[in-house]
Amino acid sequence: MNTLMVLTEGTGAAGGNSVVFLVGYVVFLVLIVYFLFVKPSKKQRKEQESLMNSIKPGDTIMTTSGFYGTVIGMDEDTVIVEFGNNKNCRIPMHKKAIAEVEKPEDAYKEDAEEEKSSKKVGKKKED
């Protein structure tokens, strides 16, 4: 009986500290998992959702398989895409298969910026 009392007396103070440490450790691990995995995936999902909502006919898109095309029609989940210069190549596809969207206005802005930068470079003066 004496050994039983010694064992229980010795683990009383240390047992309370170890439980607090264990709970703190579990909470710390849960927070790490949340900030490394859950929060970034939520952010990516919101970005993808806003991308899908911004698609309009006339936009140039790139599919997840790497094909470039132009949106010519839309439904709730389906987009009709025209690939290449062939007007007969129109394929309905799911919105989730779109990886990137380029608006026609953005293409004009990029062209204007490239023209400005090429004019600034100019030719070197010869001595």
Image: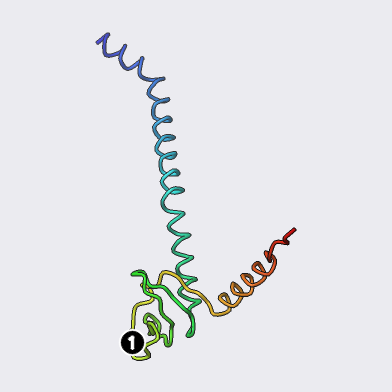
Q: Nearer the viewer, residue 5 or 110?
A: 110
Q: Give how far across and how far down residue 26 sits, in percent.
A: 39, 38
Q: Residue at x 54, y 80 (%)?
A: 104
**View extreme (top): residue:** 2
What's the image's color scheme?
rainbow
Relative to 32, does residue 102 appear above or below in the rendering? Answer: below
Label 1 secondary element: loop
The residue closer to the viewer here, 6 or 43, is: 43
Quadrant location, the C terminus: bottom right
Which residue is depicted at the point 49% across and 71% down? 50
Residue furthest to the front: 127
Which residue reaches farthest bottom? Answer: 88
User: Percent position (x, y) of residue 65?
Assistant: 33, 69
Q: Nearer the viewer, residue 38 or 57?
A: 57
Instruction: Establish if 47 lies above or below 18.
Output: below
Residue 99 picture location, percent across and down: 41, 69
Task: Give the residue furthest to the right.
Answer: 127
Left or right, residue 108 beside residue 121: left
The residue that appears at 73% across and 62% down in the rendered structure is 125
Which quadrant is home to the N terminus?
top left
Judging by the rendered image, the residue that carries numbered circle 1 is 89
Looking at the image, residue 6 lies above or below residue 95: above
As rendered, which of 71 and 5 lies closer to the eye?
71
Visible in this render: residue 81? no
User: The disc labelled 1 sits on which kind of residue?
Assistant: Cys
